[in-house]
Amino acid sequence: MSHLSDIIRADIRAMSAYQVAALPEGFTKLDAMESPYHPFAHSPQLQAEWAARLAEAPIHLYPNPATSGLQAALRQAFDIPAAAEIALGNGSDELIQLITMLVAKPGAAVLALEPSFVMYRHNAQVYGLDYIGVPLNDDFSMNLPAVLEAIAAHRPALVFVSYPNNPTGVGFSRAQVQAIINAAPGVVVVDEAYGAFSGDSFLPQAGQIENLVLMRTVSKIGFAGIRVGYAAGCAEIINELAKIVPPYNMNQLSLATAKFALEHADAIAATTAKLKAERERMLAQLQQIAAIQAFESEANFITVRVPDADQLFDTLKQNKILIKKLHGAHPLLAQCVRITMGAPGQNDAVLALMRALYEK
Ligand code: PMP
């Protein structure tokens, strides 16, 4: 047998795996846009009802997302237009991968903004596509002329726009995203992973614009652990996606939990509103600290440029708070960190430590 290193692709051997931080005992995790609240923990009755649903889930049978009722429930909860088809993914990560696979032909290109969600580039590389990264402006706004120029020059088969953008939190204007959809020769994925925290959505256009795929996830609104994402768009794209989805990619427990959650959409909306209020409160407080720059955010996190990102990361870590260090990921993210919104007490702890560091 040949040596494995000769068999496994050299470009994959040169990659590093997606980093998931280990969470030591007693730590507050504000690094990955998870909700600080278990969605049913506030109500023993909800917890009991949820447990009963899980107990009823037919785990001896393969799941069938098509007949599970989840798509219909999503349609109703999020007003997804009747014209749109829906594909379910094991997290929107899986859908990003599958959509990339759908267009992976020699010479095809994927275009995204930089910095943005790292998996757009990663999947392009894994599937052998050219990757065009168009830098944001220094203030993390979109450089639309540069994007349109790159679209004209490279004719990408696939464009990803994170709306609002991770890891910056800064929103783009609707007109900018619309201009990209109009100009792109191929598929445009508007990734609204943080859509619940922003004031705008392209969801009402799903199924009505031929090249638009609208993507959402339940991860940021309290359900990161169940791995449910969805893509909505015209049949012409979504039906092709259905051909390459791995069989049984959605498990019975997740389907049951997601359906149960949607029956209690009010509770989810209340938590989302609470986190948005925390974001506004934190932003106002952080913007009062003269030594740092806190960027406006339409998501459930705030990106901050500080004098020394390592120092802040380490100080918070010593105090059992984990945030995301962005410094080093992209030149525009120099000395930046990203802080996921936690519960008020957790956010206050971050604020107190930052004030102690920067308001001496
Ligand atoms: N899109 C964006 C922009 C994200 O930030 C994330 C999570 N980091 C995802 C998609 C993936 O979300 P999930 O797979 O949990 O649905």
Image (tube, rainbow, N blue to C red):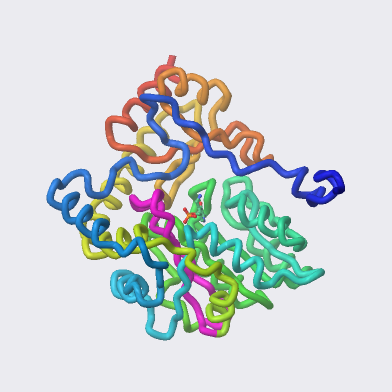
Based on the displayed image, in which of its 4 quarters is residue 33 positioned? top left
Q: Residue at x 28, y 30 (%)?
A: 345
Coordinates of residue 252 in the picture (x, y in percent): 36, 62
In the foreground, 209 or 97: 97
Based on the displayed image, in which of its 4 quarters is residue 53 positioned? bottom left
Q: Was residue 212 drawn as part of the magenta stretch in this picture? A: yes
Q: Residue furthest left?
A: 45
> Horizontally, is 12 left or right of 197 in the view?
right
Residue 216 in view: no
Q: Was residue 256 drawn as part of the magenta stretch in this picture? A: no
Write the start and end of the magenta stretch as one range: 209-235
Coordinates of residue 227 in the picture (x, y in percent): 43, 55
Q: Residue at x 54, y 29 (%)?
A: 306
Q: Residue at x 48, y 67 (%)?
A: 248
In the foreground, 21 or 275: 21
> Horizontally, is 288 left or right of 247 in the view?
left
Q: Residue furthest top?
A: 360
Above or below, 52 against 233 in this view is above
Q: How many tags in the picture?
A: 0
Residue 156 in view: yes
Q: Residue at x 39, y 39 (%)?
A: 283
Coordinates of residue 133 in the picture (x, y in percent): 70, 56
